[in-house]
Amino acid sequence: MGVLFRVHRQLGNRYQEKYYQRAVEADLGREKIAYEREFEVKLYLL
């Protein structure tokens, strides 16, 4: 969560989503945090 807050604090809310994605990926890489980009999630309605 710290990475996400840091990116938002640095970029604010004026950019397109792709720029936030790139910044988050860069920070996760620097922190050596594993992640998977845009994976499919199955949703079930009850």
Image (cartoon, helix red, strand yellow):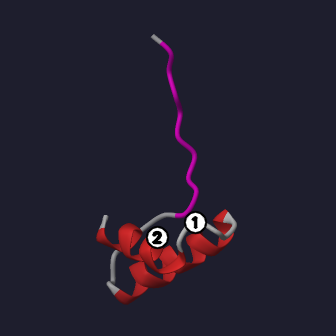
Q: Kindly state the secondary structure of the residue where label 2 is placed.
A: helix
Instruction: State the extent of the magenta-drawn residues as a range.
Output: 37-45
Whether 40 is among the magenta residues is yes
Left or right, residue 3 beside residue 38: left
Amino acid under label 2? His
Determine crowd level at label 2: few under 14, some 14-19, many 20+ residues with C-alpha closer than 10 A. some
Determine crowd level at label 1: few under 14, some 14-19, many 20+ residues with C-alpha closer than 10 A. few
Vertical placement of residue 15 versus 45, above or below: below
Write down the quadrant of residue 33 in the picture.
Answer: bottom left
- How far apart, in angstroms, are the residues tagged by discs 2 and 1? 7 Å
Residue 29, position as x, y percentages in the image: 42, 84
Q: Which mark is residue 8?
A: 2
Check contact, mark 2 vs mark 1: CB within 8 A: yes
From where the camera sits, is residue 25 visible?
A: yes
Which residue is found at the position 64% from the left and 74% from the top?
Answer: 19
Q: Which residue is mark 1?
A: 13
Q: Kindly state the secondary structure of the residue where label 1 is placed.
A: loop
Left or right, residue 5 beside residue 7: left
Residue 40, position as x, y percentages in the image: 57, 46
